[in-house]
Amino acid sequence: MAKQQSLDLRDKPALTTGPAADYIGVGHSTLNRWRREGRAPAHITLSWRKYLWPKHDLDAFLEARRVEAAAPSNEGGVA
């Protein structure tokens, strides 16, 4: 049997599903759907319907989806 890795969250803030969904700007049901589909940020399963979402993982999820605005082009001939 594989040894489980210790998880220490004492100094790392984590949110439950509702506040985590608010934090990343989606609905509670959307975050749960993403979790079921394997598309959600990293999270911790506490029980069959209780999850913790470490804030640093939510931040990393948002940063990975960051899109820089493109510089406007002058191809349309408008000055």
Image (cartoon, rainbow, N blue to C red):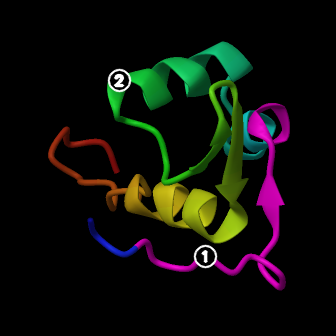
Q: Is residue 17 magenta?
A: yes
Q: Quadrant of residue 11?
A: bottom right
Give whichever of 36, 19 is nearer the camera: 36
In the figure, 22 relative to 26: above or below?
A: below
Secondary structure mostly seen in magenta is loop
Which residue bears the numbered disc 2?
37
Q: Position of residue 24 (x, y in %)?
A: 67, 44
- Circle on res. 7: 1
Q: Quadrant of residue 16?
A: top right
Amino acid bearing label 1: Leu
Q: Identify which residue is drawn at 37% across, 35% down.
A: 39
Q: Identify which residue is drawn at 71% across, 64% down.
A: 55
Q: Identify which residue is drawn at 28% across, 70% down.
A: 2
Q: Position of residue 78 (x, y in %)?
A: 30, 42
Quick one: quadrant of the N terminus?
Answer: bottom left
Magenta range: 4-19
In the figure, 59 relative to 51: above or below?
A: below
* Badge 1 vs badge 2, beta-carbon distance below 8 Å: no
Classify mark 2: helix, strand or loop. helix
Q: Identify which residue is drawn at 75% across, 43% down.
A: 20
